[in-house]
Amino acid sequence: MENRKLLALTVWTVVGSYVAFLMMCTATFTNHWIYTREIVKITNDTGIYSRDTQQHSGLLVTCQFDDKIHWNPHEGENSSWDAPLSENECRNLKKVLSNQDNPPDTITFAVFVHTSKSFAVPLMTCFLLLSAVIVCTVGQFMPKRRCMVFLSGSICVVCGLTSLTAIVRFVIAVNDAIIEKHSQSNDVIFQHHYGFSFVLTVLTFLLTNGVGVASLHLFILLERQAARSEKERVRHHLQRLGMNVVRTADESASFNNPEQGNERYGLPVSSWKETQYGFEGEPNWKDDRAKSEL
């Protein structure tokens, strides 16, 4: 039962670290963090002119998939009409922002300005997850290096914190841009929702924390198993030398010589204590013969 538990934790930590790394890389370098729709209305003597722009953006690229104008004349004028304004295309976010006014004149581009500054944290999370994957993989080929399990678990916990930081920074950046520009634009309707890249980042946060906790728990179980193995090895070695380990009520141990009528030799019962990690104490040999036998 215990071996099955260790196997399940090992599979979960290895597979989870790889999946978390792929998810975070996908989220960082795709352009579906946020979807925006902004309607700007301008009223003059003849009617109402409105521009409806819909875009989705990531941390590096922004894509415009709908941009049209709508003309709605006052009563008695010609009928209303719609027309596309520009072609749908994806552009580098830095180039787009460099061509805009400073400060930006629309809420959408204010959002892009604020969110583009959050790229460093997700990128750092990707590198940390890559290091966790490498350490976890190396640890599978070096099973005696249990410190690798502890190190990979610690890195995954740190990755969980950095991914949470990226999520919080992105949400705050969007809200700051809306508060900053929307109060100055009474004739603007702005709508937004988060895309699957943002959702992948949230899932990465949950997954990395789960993998980190599982790795640390696996490290504790491996340490306990190693301590029990060492304890049994010492017990077997002492029995092979013709010495019996005798347990007493206070969990201490002493040694008897079966060939000499259970003559006690070695060290007192109180100074050689058997614990869950092995035998504690230093031998106090009665003669050189007994010492040389070990």
Image (cartoon, grey):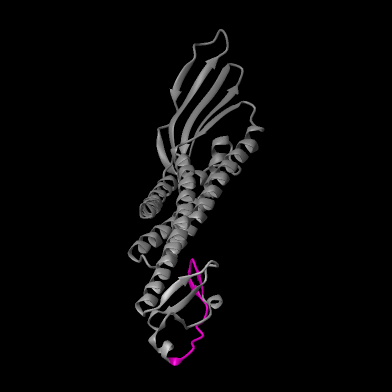
Q: Nearer the viewer, residue 38 or 134?
A: 134
Q: Looking at the picture, how far across and down is residue 280, in whole percent?
A: 51, 75
Q: Looking at the picture, how far across and down is residue 186, in whole percent?
A: 65, 27
Q: Is residue 122 above or below residue 136?
A: above
Q: Residue furthest top?
A: 76
Residue 94 falls within the magenta-colored stretch: no
Residue 93 visible? The answer is: no
| Residue depicted at 47% across the width and 55% down the height | 217
Q: Nearer the viewer, residue 121 or 264?
A: 264
* Quarter of the image with the C terminus in it: bottom left
**Numbered disc total:** 0
Q: Looking at the picture, how far across and down is residue 259, in whole percent?
A: 37, 82
Span of residues in magenta: 273-288
Q: Quadrant of residue 270?
A: bottom right
| Residue depicted at 61% across the width and 17% down the height | 45
Q: Looking at the picture, how far across and down is residue 10, in whole percent?
A: 38, 55
| Residue depicted at 49% across the width and 59% down the height | 154
Residue 280 falls within the magenta-colored stretch: yes
Q: Is residue 130 above or below residue 94?
A: below
Q: Nearer the viewer, residue 229 or 156?
A: 229
